[in-house]
Amino acid sequence: MNQYIGKMLRVDLSTGEISKEALDDELVQNYIGGRGFNSRLAYNEIKPGIDPLSPENVLLMAAGPLGGTIAPASNRLSIAALSPQTGILGYANVGDSFAPSLRWAGYEQMVFTGKSPEPVYLWIDDDKVELRTAKHLWGKGVHETVHQIRKELESPEATLLSIGPAGENLVRFACVVGNLHRAAGRCGMGAVMGSKNLKSIAVRGTGTVKVARPQEFMKLAKAAHHKVKNSVLYPEFSIKGTSGMFVGHARMGIASVWNHQRVATVEEISKVGYEGQSQYFTRSLACYSCSMHCSHRWAISDGPYAGEKGSGMEYGVSVFLTSILGNFYVPSAFKGLNLVNDYGMDTTEFGCALAAAFEWYQKGIITKEDTGGMALEWGNYETILDLIGKIARREGFGDLLAEGAIRAAKVIGKGAEKFVTDCKGLSTHGADMRSVKGTILSLGICNKGADVMDAAPAAEFLSPEERKHMFGSADYGDPSKYTGKARLVFDKGIDGMIGDIFQICKFNTSWAWPGMLDANELVDMYNAAVCTSMTKEDVMMVAERIHTLERAFQARSGITKKDDFIKGPMTEEPVADGPLKGEHVDPEKYREALEEYYEVAGWDKETGVPTRAKLEKLGLGFVADDLEREGKLLVFR
Amino acid sequence: MSKRIKIDGSLCVGCGICELACSFNKVGEFGRSRSAIRVFDNEENDIFPVIIGQFTDVECTAKVDVVIGKHELDWCTMCRESCPAKAAFKELKNTAGIYCNMCGNPPDPQCVQWCPTGALMLVES
């Protein structure tokens, strides 16, 4: 057992039994940490096809092997379980300070099984770990829950992961909220917590994290922080954060309005992007051990939401509360952010469900009779904010939308489905990616569904001049081209996975931008921290192993090539206006790029299932055996 | 001229890198509880690092409300976990307290060196 890797905390919520286990060397060596540990354990412990909201589902949470150290942005925690939204493996991750605290307390991973007979929360106070009643907290928002728990534990610094009413009410896209303002958003991990009657997890770690070669580690970490601070990305990103991308999207002609019916102008997005938000920002904010500090504290000083204050307002929040719904009043987005955080739900899925619903209303597929009298008119932010609570409480029309866009569309019928852009049941990015061919492919092959955080190539969002300057050719990453994208997306997926196994925020790594921390720097820090001697190639192999294992998990749940096509207006219709008018996804070229991707990944060209040869090469022979036994693998390949 | 650490809370982003740099300097390991600097954050608009000076065994009896900007803070809530009377803030092995001794000779504190925003500065006192 590696002494620099913490223990696994196993909590059987049905019996209340809590045990601590050492993580075995084979797991550490082959999966490194974070998302890797979760996906490997999920493969062993979650049976494909079970009801994600049943006690049989297993909720996994893991820090990275650098968590709690001074390594840049090593603060992220991966959460995985069978997703209530998609029915396949789901995963998300969250920053702030939970993972560092967990590692200071001595733990690497938490595994929750079963279902508690009544609402509980887990209190990890270093060695002392106990389940405490949460009956008095059930029904309460995240804000009140966090304050109440800190008060009763007499620990104002306890760091928490909680669910709000959305998680309790099994809203399929309920998220897990870190402290007050951070979230592991996607795939409905909050609903899994809710289904297990687990309201919150609080941790106080007063111990330390030791590293194997301290002086070497410190030197590497300092160089890594230096590299981040001197990167091309830093000057703008450390001030604007992810919201800064918003107006860039408008310039490109990919900022969607009205559920991708038209694109926004730069003027419109300037009202709701960083340019419009910044007047309310009061200071910059960082997650633990991150010098990038891309987030903000904010306070609203005017209008109907004056007095509202909080943290965050990332791109992925603002887009789904504003432009996609035709709303250009930025204070309403801040108010909405506080509401979604307090109720605990994923803004992406919320925004997509609303965007679809508003278009159904616009097109007459639903009427006031269906919505309980609400007029779903584009840009009406009062209706948008009203629906947050209605969905979380599963009230009236909100109850239907709480099922997520695609399930709601199936209930409604009348062709409602064609207004939902999704892949594998997970709704997609807020920007109009049909003009960005590599990114569309990355949404199609992302293991969890149409999510942008796995493998979207940043190069596609640069101008031709920037691409020429950075990569030597403007053709590299040209958003309009399919050629070369399979390789680009595959490599980007590996970059992203490396961030997720070390649990270093991807906005500090080369996933986000050339010249940020790459696999070499991360593996050097890792070796110095946990006393290993891995190479960059080893780590890339680990990343590919996890990516392929996740794909195999999904294949066992029935996912094949047919599920790698994005459905809905974003891929089925051309762009209606703006500089990219007429751009569309060519199904034939997309299929070719997809097949090329399979070839790069070593997956079968006809089925999209990993081949035995590839699985064996990655040390996943046991997975090939499982797939073969279940008839998912084409024999003789 | 002796030196002191000047704190500009308005520049602090709450990253806690100073805590880790300090704990590493003190004990060769990483952990907020072994640091002589602690970043407090009331999750509203106040984030400020507090440097722990030398302390005695006397229990705190003060109960002071502090006003920063427009916010009134219960100071006890803010510093409870770093209070020297609390076991959590003592070096567990020998129960000796961890406090700032202006590391480096001449003084060149690790927290100042690592602070990414200039919230901590070394100045002449």
Image (cartoon, coloured by chain):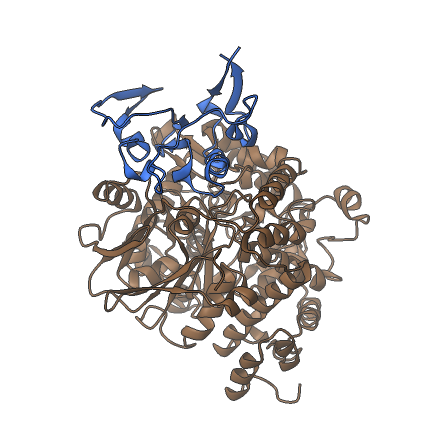
Residue A309 coordinates in the image, percent (x, y): 37, 33
Say whether residue A210 is left or right of residue A130: right
Viewer-side residue, A126 vs A184 = A126
Residue furthest out toward the right: A472
Chain A rendering hue? brown
Report the front residue among B76 and A489.
Answer: B76
- Please give the name of the residue rendered at 51% of the width and 13% of the height, measured from the top-left corner: B2
Q: Give the residue at x 65% y 76%.
A: A617
Residue B41, image x, y percentages: 37, 32
Quarter of the image holding residue A250? top right
Quarter holding the C terminus of chain A is: bottom right
Asked if residue B119 is positioned above or below residue A289 in the image, the reply reads above
Spot occupied by residue A415 in the image (x, y as percentages of width and height) = 46, 67
Chain letter of the blue region: B
A287 horizontally vs A473: left or right: left
Residue A246, by quadrant, is: top right
Residue A377, visible in the rendered structure: no
